[in-house]
Image (cartoon, helix red, strand yellow):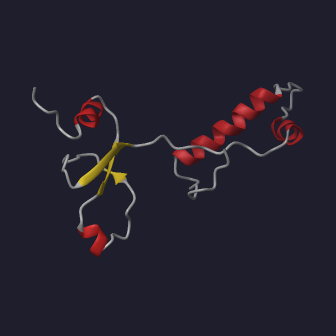
Amino acid sequence: MKKSHKHAELIKQWADGAKIQSRRNDVSLLVCPPKHPDFEDDPFPEWSINRDYRIKPEPQCPKTSMSDVELENFFSLANGCKPTREVLRDIANGAIARAIHDEQVIIAPGQIEG
């Protein structure tokens, strides 16, 4: 039986539309480490044995720290309608996620609490 390519599973996922990231993994890194040893977006991967590949992880977005009262005060509507606290929290968290997605806000590593 023929041995499959080292990155066969990732290649299949990339062909199905997954976004790939890569980084160098060769011995030269020990002598001259790169400025950015982390994974970087790789829209056209070469599938080299001298690189590590992974599926680009989905960004983790922080959640609002606003209290229920703050949410209610912030989102209260002029016509007297009052959305539920759950709806308000979903709106706030959605706004945070969208701001991060649009790169209006950048989250530093380690800044998101679990």
- The number of numbered discs placed on residues in the rendered structure image is 0
Residue drawn at 52 percent across, 47 percent down: 102
22 sits to left or right of 88? left
Quadrant in the rendering for residue 34: bottom left
Q: Position of residue 75 (x, y in %)?
A: 81, 36
Quadrant in the rendering for residue 82: top right
In this view, the residue farthest toward the left is: 2
Vertical side of 22 occupied by 9: above or below = above
Residue 15 or 100: which is nearer the viewer? 15
Q: Quadrant of the image for the C terminus?
A: top right
107 sits to left or right of 51? right
In this view, the residue farthest toward the bottom is: 31
Residue drawn at 19 percent across, 51 percent down: 49
Q: Position of residue 84 (x, y in %)?
A: 82, 25
Residue 60 or 76: which is nearer the viewer? 60
48 sits to left or right of 24? left
Q: Position of residue 36 (x, y in %)?
A: 38, 65
Residue drawn at 70 percent across, 34 percent down: 91
Residue drawn at 75 percent across, 27 percent down: 87
4 sits to left or right of 17? left
In this view, the residue farthest toward the front is: 1
Q: Quadrant of the image for the N terminus?
A: top left
Q: Position of residue 74 (x, y in %)?
A: 83, 41
